[in-house]
Amino acid sequence: MKKVIVALTGASGSVYFLRLVEILSKKELELHLVASEQGRKVLLYETGMELEEQSKLWSKNAAKVILEDNENLFSPIASGSYRCDAMAVVPCSMSTAAEIATGVTKTLLTRAADVMIKEHRKLVLVPRETPLSPIHLKNMYELSKLGVTILPAMPGFYNHPQTLDDMVNFVAGKVLDSLEIENNCYERWEGKYEN
Ligand SMILES: Cc1cc2nc3c(=O)[nH]c(=O)nc-3n(C[C@H](O)[C@H](O)[C@H](O)COP(=O)(O)O)c2cc1C
């Protein structure tokens, strides 16, 4: 069974996390969820949802859902010997991106990301910040040189989104594509030959 980690931080856009986990929870996966303290607070502020309650609902779906404690560095996902296939940080704050970029990883969330990098496994960060400072850009550039996918929460408009849901699905679908997980979250571009 594929093992996937989805992490939540205190950047705006926790709705992307909710959508992504909702979709992943319906698949035959081992799904590890880890959230920073600020991630939980922003989730509550933006959506009115508590991670624990949501997690209980997701647990009723096909995936084996494990809600991790961000302080527990004894968790299996803190070690490279526990072979997780992929990890996404959705949304990823600039603070967490900086922590991962420096390798000073004192929480389970950032340690798990550090492990993905050292083991050359798939790591996707979904930043949500604007404008971006040179510090943010430098950190993301360094991470991207290490093979980390930087996938900004930037919905496209070429597929003519009609609702907010369409825009959220677009970003969730892009993350799933990056994690190599089949999905039909958004309409794919099929080309155009005439002007
Ligand atoms: C409502 C709210 C929205 C925020 N949005 C962002 C954001 O979009 N991007 C970002 O990098 N930080 C954002 N922040 C700041 C982060 O929450 C802050 O840097 C925090 O230290 C991140 O902690 P974490 O990385 O451990 O989750 C926001 C804070 C609040 C209260």
Image (cartoon, rainbow, N blue to C red):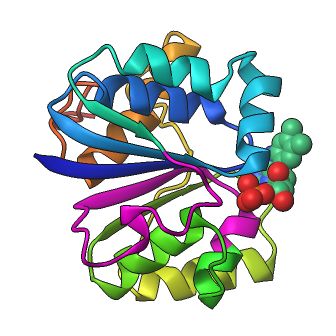
Q: Quadrant of residue 57?
A: top left
Residue located at (25% from left, 69% from top) = 82
Q: Is residue 78 visible?
A: yes
Residue 130 falls left or right of residue 155: right
Residue located at (54% from left, 33% from top) = 16
Q: Quadrant of the C terminus?
A: top left
In the image, which residues are magenta? 68-97
Residue 134 falls left or right of residue 91: right
Vertical position of residue 132 compared to residue 174: above or below: below
Q: Quadrant of residue 66?
A: top left
* Percent of width and height locating residue 30: 24, 42
Compare residues 155 and 150 and report the one nearer the observer.
Answer: 150
Vertical position of residue 16 compared to residue 55: above or below: below
Vertical position of residue 54 compared to residue 129: above or below: above
Which residue appears farthest toward the left when viewing the image? 1
Residue located at (76% from left, 68% from top) = 95
Q: Is residue 40 magenta?
A: no
* Percent of width and height locating residue 58: 39, 20
Residue located at (24% from left, 21% from top) = 26
Which residue appears farthest toward the front when viewing the image? 74
